[in-house]
Image (cartoon, coloured by chain):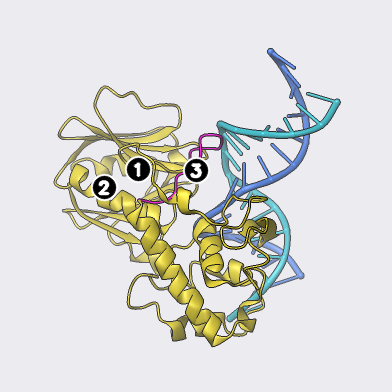
Chain colours: A yellow, B cyan, C blue
Amino acid sequence: MPELPEVETYVRELEPLLLGRQVVAAQVTWPRTIATPDAVAFVHAVVGQRFTTFDRRGKYMLLGFASGDTLVVHLRMTGHLYVQAADVAPDKHTHVVMELDDGRRLHFQDSRKFGRIWLIPSSEGVVQKLGPEPLGPGFTVTGFAERVARRKASIKTLLLDQSIVAGVGNIYADESLFAAGIHPARAGGDLSYEELTRLHAAIRAVLQRAIQLNGSSLGSSRVQNYLRPTGEPGGFQDEHKVYQRTGQACVQCAHPIERIVLGQRSTHFCPQCQK
DNA sequence: ATAAGGCCCTGACCGC
DNA sequence: TGCGGTCAGGGCCTTA
């Protein structure tokens, strides 16, 4: 699943491929992919736009045009953005194609069709409900503690709430809780300030390491949820300590990793290391 | 304000 | 081999 590290990798790697390029034509073959405006208006409005800025907010990509408009892209579960040569035909899962002035094409491919694209004058309306960026100065221990105080929901569920901290998804929630030694089913309000301090640091360390390794790509036996714009996989999956390691030995204590469901999401943890 | 459940989608996987 | 059923999962929506 593309989460913060994967989206960050996308933005970094798309910049040299798209900076200064102009969109000269566009096609939309699954209209629901375009959240705003409608697909017909999108095609009309995107043609002629030139890419100038490349940013990220939570799991949203913010691709800014010279006009001031922003192309906001959320990959959800299986979305990909590939820069392809002109002779690469879009496959059946490619729902939006933007032709560039250098002959290449930007393909938005998404087998589950959950991903969304907005073309809007300002990204503010789309991202305003997000909590702080976990790697930015706005993510403080005290602010984090205030947001989870008195909450009865599990800390795992709260980490997935994008209004508490932006960009953490299922992989990095599980990995962060393991790194902090905290049981995922604990109620948010039951965690001590010391535990929240550990978790806060763990979230940042895990995300930074995952960005260093260009994110997590899942194995070939499963849906290929994430590949970089170049089609290469990331490297952090080799450092997963609990995520999708059900039944395997914990790297710290050798106890088998367990899987439970919290907030309708599969959750992986070591019952011996996470209390 | 918070919590819980449904919805969108389709490839992979399972049992028969 | 084929078929039907189940699962995963981010964010948003509705309902309690």
In the image, what residue occupies the spot 30% across and 38% down?
A230
Residue kind at label 2, given as amino acid type: Glu
- Quadrant containing the C terminus of chain A in the rendered view: bottom right
Contact between labelled residues 2 and 1, with CB atoms less than 8 Å apart: yes
Residue highlighted by disc 2: A13
Residue A213 horizontal side relative to residue A23, left or right = right
Work out how far the residue at label 1 is from the one at label 3, CA to CA, in angstroms.
Answer: 12 Å
Q: Marks 1 and 2, Cα distance to the nearest angstrom? A: 8 Å
Residue extending furthest toward the front: A253
In terms of sequence position, does the residue under pointer 2 or pointer 3 come before the other?
Answer: 2
Amino acid type at image mark 1: Arg
Tag 3 secondary structure: loop
Q: Which residue is mark 3?
A: A218
Segment tinted magenta in the rendering = A214-224
Circle 1: is it few (<14), some (14-19), or many (20+) Cα within 10 Å? Answer: many
Residue A219 is covered by the magenta coloring: yes
